[in-house]
Amino acid sequence: MPGLRRIFRYMHPYRWIAFIGFFTVILPVIMELVTPRMVQFVIDKGIRGQNMDAVWQGSL
């Protein structure tokens, strides 16, 4: 743990850059997890329900 505290002490002036870097790593992971739900929505509401508006909404 002392090594980690030392790293954080040096990173303190760059905390916003570190936050943005962390966010840009996490955002694609979240988007990869959302994609199957979007496909499920298109299939369940649009194709099975014969609702083309839901298909268009899910594809955008």
Image (cartoon, rainbow, N blue to C red):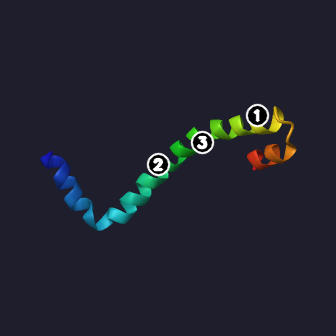
Q: Secondary structure at mark 2?
A: helix
* Callout 1–callout 2 Cβ contact below 8 Å: no
Determine the CA span between mark 1 and mark 2.
29 Å
The residue depicted at 76 percent of the width and 45 percent of the height is 59
- Name the disc covering residue 43, or none: 1
> Residue at image x 79%, y 45%?
54
Q: Which residue is mark 2?
A: 25
Residue at 71% over, 39% down: 41
For disc 3, the marked residue is 34
Q: Nearer the viewer, residue 29 or 58?
A: 58
Q: Position of residue 9 (x, y in %)?
A: 20, 60
For this orientation, the residue located farthest to the left is 2
Badge 2 density bin: few <14, some 14–19, many ≥20, Cα 10 Å: few
Position in image of residue 45 (x %, y %): 77, 38
Secondary structure under the numbered disc 1 in the rendered image: helix
Say which label, 3 or 2, has the lower sequence index.
Answer: 2
